[in-house]
Image (cartoon, grey):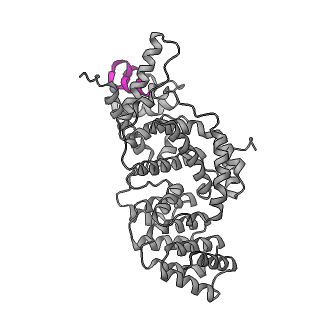
């Protein structure tokens, strides 16, 4: 075994220190100072004392929660902050993509093409992951917008649909997005997704999106919950 | 409610009436999370604020938690985002206050204890010299409750790719830790 293989194997061993190393490794470690050093360092790291937080921290959190929650409840999380940073945060929460400048995520060699094919495959969890992955590379791409809209319209999982709506925030600068969402809204059969789409249209803060939304309301093309939601949002934003 | 597991508590949080459930999750997980944040920021008050920020985001983004999903990897995903925002706010990565990171002096100053404390100090200093993302990766890797499969999910890569990355970070730490002390 090469030293690198041993050292990578030691990664597993450092997690489960109670397990006994294979005899072959022990023999190698005895003769190889390099690998011994790595092992020693992992042991040091795992014994790194953990600083303990202040015992009153839970209580402080409880108070902060009581103080801040009424505010967050009043606003839809999607509207709590406008624009891309929030959308990015949402995606991060959904799938673990990374904020710009902090990216550790290696994208596949051809992320978009691979992911577009992936969009239809796997479990709902896989599709959520795909949406987060592909949009972490956030730049306008109409294929991607179409793929996301397809998920919004057709995916059997409501969670996947909602996550695709969230991902669309990334493409808020795409001028055709408002129209496309206005097209998608009336045929959406999931009330929660309809509401999320209304929020997205409002968040686009674009006159055309607002007009399209108002038209949908006037033409009675939205379900009652979505219509009520849209009216409230339009009034709120004075769009 | 104490008998519920993390995923069940999250189901309550998702359902929108889970403030007690959230506080329970906080109680269960904030200790190690604080340790992780402290090792990265080197600052007690900052880490205490960030821990709370993480759990407020748990509430806010509870809908993105998939039922039955392991809670801790998801929590650390949020923690990484909170950290990313924290660093972005601070714009540049300011040098860590090494003094603030110093470990409490050993109460019993036996030779072995002192040596141990010195090693730990040296280790923290070696970590401080590493790029943030590698430091973070190593600190997460040592957490026995996060498997490499969990971490691969968090970092969006395969397990083998993740291990190679951890291995490389380890090599860097090793060269920093074992390098002879600079004499001026
Ligand atoms: Zn070796």
Classified by dominant secondary structure, the portion drawn in magenta counts as helix
- Residue A179 visible, this angle: no
Residue range highlighted in magenta: A24-42
Task: Please indicate whether residue B49 sits to the left or right of residue B41 in the image.
Answer: right
> What's the residue at 63%, 60% (across, down)?
A71
Please state the quadrant of the image where ligand 1 appears.
Answer: top left
Residue A225 position (above or below residue A28): below
> What's the residue at 49%, 68% (across, down)?
A169
Residue A21 position (above or below residue B152): above
Residue A215 position (above or below residue A237): below
Relative to the observer, which residue lies in front, A37 or B1? Answer: B1
The N terminus of chain B is located in which quarter? top right
Residue B57 position (above or below residue A59): below
Q: Percent from the top left, x then y, of residue A157?
A: 61, 65
Q: Quadrant of residue A173?
A: bottom left
- Residue A88 visible, this angle: yes
């Amino acid at each position: 075994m090469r030293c690198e293989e041993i050292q990578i194997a030691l990664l597993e061993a450092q997690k489960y220190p109670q397990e006994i190393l294979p005899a072959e490794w022990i023999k190698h470690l005895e003769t190889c100072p390099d690998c011994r050093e790595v092992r020693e360092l992992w042991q040091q790291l795992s014994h790194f004392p953990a600083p303990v937080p202040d015992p009153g921290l839970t209580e402080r959190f409880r108070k902060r929660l009581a103080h801040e929650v009424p505010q967050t409840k009043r606003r839809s999380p999607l509207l709590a902050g406008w624009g891309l940073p929030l959308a990015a945060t949402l995606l991060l929460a959904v799938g673990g993509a990374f904020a710009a400048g902090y990216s550790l995520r290696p994208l596949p060699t051809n992320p978009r093409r691979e992911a577009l094919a992936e969009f239809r495959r796997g479990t709902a969890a896989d599709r959520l992951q795909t949406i987060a992955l592909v949009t972490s590379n956030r730049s306008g791409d109409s294929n991607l917008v179409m793929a996301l809209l397809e998920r919004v319209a057709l995916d059997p999982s409501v969670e996947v649909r909602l996550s695709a709506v969230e991902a669309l925030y990334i493409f808020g600068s795409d001028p055709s997005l408002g129209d496309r969402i206005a097209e998608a809204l009336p045929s959406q059969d999931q009330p929660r997704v309809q509401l999320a789409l209304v929020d997205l249209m409002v968040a686009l803060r674009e006159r055309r999106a607002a007009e399209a939304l108002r038209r949908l309301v006037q033409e009675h093309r939205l379900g009652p919950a979505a219509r009520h939601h849209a009216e409230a949002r339009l009034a709120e934003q004075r769009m | 409610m104490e008998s519920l597991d993390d995923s069940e508590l999250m189901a309550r949080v998702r359902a929108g009436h889970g403030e007690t459930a959230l506080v329970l999750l906080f109680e269960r997980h904030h200790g190690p999370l604080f340790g992780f944040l402290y090792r990265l920021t080197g600052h007690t008050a900052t880490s205490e604020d960030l821990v709370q920020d993480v759990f407020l985001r748990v509430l806010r983004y509870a809908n993105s938690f998939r039922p039955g999903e392991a809670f801790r990897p998801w929590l650390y995903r949020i923690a990484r985002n909170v950290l990313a925002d924290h660093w972005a706010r601070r714009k540049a990565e300011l040098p860590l206050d090494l003094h603030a990171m110093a470990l409490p002096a050993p109460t019993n100053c036996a030779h072995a204890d002192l040596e141990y404390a010195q090693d730990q100090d040296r280790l923290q200093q070696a970590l401080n010299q590493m790029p943030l993302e590698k430091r973070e990766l190593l600190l997460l890797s040592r957490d026995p409750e996060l498997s490499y499969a969990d971490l691969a999910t968090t970092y969006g890569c395969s397990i083998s790719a993740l291990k190679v990355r951890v291995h490389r970070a380890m090599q860097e730490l090793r060269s920093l830790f074992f390098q002879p002390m600079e004499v001026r």
